[in-house]
Image: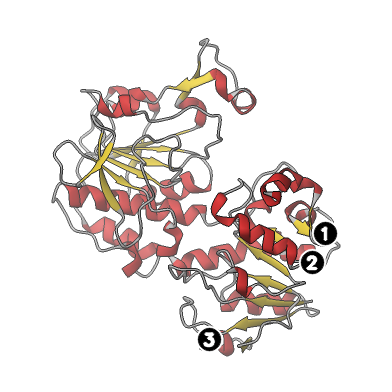
Amino acid sequence: MKFGIIKERKNPPDRRVVFSPNELAKLKQLYHDASVEVESSDIRVFSDIQYKSMGITVTDDISGSDVLFGVKEVPIDSLIPNKSYFFFSHTIKKQPYNQKLLKAILEKNITLYDHETIVDSLDRRLIGFGRYAGMVGVYNGIRAFGIKFELFKLPKAETLDGRDALINQLKRITMPALKFVITGTGKVGNGAKEILDAIKIKEITVDNYLTKKYAQAVYVQLDVLEYNKRIDGKVLDFKDFVEHPKEYVSDFEKFTKVTDIYFAGHFYASEAPVILTQEMLNASDCKLKIVADISCDVNGPIACTLRSSTIAEPLYGYFPLENKEVDVFHPAAVVVMAVDNLPCELPKDASEGFGEQFMEHVIPAFFNGDKDGILARAKMTENGKLTPRFSYLQDYVSL
């Protein structure tokens, strides 16, 4: 089995990679039947020399590999026919901007495994960059507060050397007695929690958060049933919410009355209730000053996320009265941070963590006959056709 690491070609450039040099060396050590090569790249967070120093072949021609690993979408003209690819294709929700990509994958007889489709038998995602999105999202949200109120200056996350550097910068500032709320208890939400815990922000109960004042910064992390409620008032379980999302409405407004910074790190299903509405943001007793929408679903559950922002220009102002974008320093503006590729700001940490997950959950499947069905579930295309699991995309590729 010959594995290849492809050069990232999407713009803006992405410095992340599926495997660090150390992880590839480990792969070769564990699986003697595997050979590995890396396509030369001048943008990757790990240099060609770092791979070569670990005994990994670096080449300009990757076409001899059987399975190719990338992070972002591969441009159509760079796809090599008749290969197996792993990358984020951003097609499983029928995203219009990548329709041509999926069509080309079928036409070129490519076997596609999307990183998002790598799940266990209960359909829980096994790999992703969510933890790092949560980390950077918290840093950027606190940085936004410092900018808006001219209290402190933090450097951009992308200029720092990883998670520990983010934490050190946050520890240096004098933190006001702010209240932070996190929605989501998955990888993103827990990545956000990890940073707040590391800088010694006190976690408190929901009741205390809503009713008490503190002389120090505090936070609460909410699960989905703590910010949504059934319309009929019944108290049921998460399974009911997943099966009947239309029976629920947001119960988030009570948090907007006491929260300074909101970190949105939830998973959002299309029929689930809007979490933060324009009406909540426009209410006279809304205290929200910063909304760091880490999940970043434009036209989704967070009304102030009018668009995604960029690493270069991460912030914009939202004027609730008119539901429009304004300057960050507009006196009535809620500041929005809605960068949709936050892990790119921690490329080294994110790549190392992603590779560890990949080594644990995916690589063994190539050598154990896929006994746990990891590859079978993740496979979107084969022999020029969609696999049965992804046949719902047929109308998307037939248009």
Q: Which quadrant, please, contains the N terminus?
A: bottom right
Lower sequence index among marks 3 and 1? 3
Q: Which x, y percent locates residue 339?
A: 38, 53
Q: Residue 48 carries which label?
A: 3
60 shown above or below 300: below
Q: Which residue is at a point 62% across and 59% down the rendered structure image?
A: 100
Of helix, strand and loop, which one carries label 1? loop
Left or right: residue 299 compared with residue 388: left
Q: Which quadrant holds residue 234?
A: top right
Q: Which residue is at a point 27% across and 38% down the rendered structure image?
A: 324
Q: Which x, y percent locates residue 115?
A: 63, 57
The residue tagged 1 is 370
Q: Which x, y percent locates residue 196?
A: 36, 48
**C-alpha span from label 2 to label 3:** 26 Å
Of helix, strand and loop, which one carries label 3? helix
**C-alpha span from label 3 to label 1:** 31 Å
Q: Which residue is at a point 70% across and 46% down the rendered structure image?
A: 393
- For mark 2, does the 10 Å Cα neighbourhood hold few (<14), some (14 to 19), or many (20 or more) residues? some
- For mark 1, does the 10 Å Cα neighbourhood hold few (<14), some (14 to 19), or many (20 or more) residues? some
Of helix, strand and loop, which one carries label 2? helix
Proximity of marks 2 and 1: CB atoms separated by less than 8 Å: yes
**C-alpha span from label 2 to label 1:** 6 Å
Lower sequence index among marks 2 and 3? 3
Could you say which is closer to the camera, residue 254 or residue 385?
Answer: 385
Q: Which residue is at a point 73% across and 66% down the rendered structure image?
A: 363
8 shown above or below 249: below
Residue 159 shows up from this direction: yes
Residue type at mark 3 is Asp
The residue tagged 2 is 366
Residue type at mark 1 is Asp
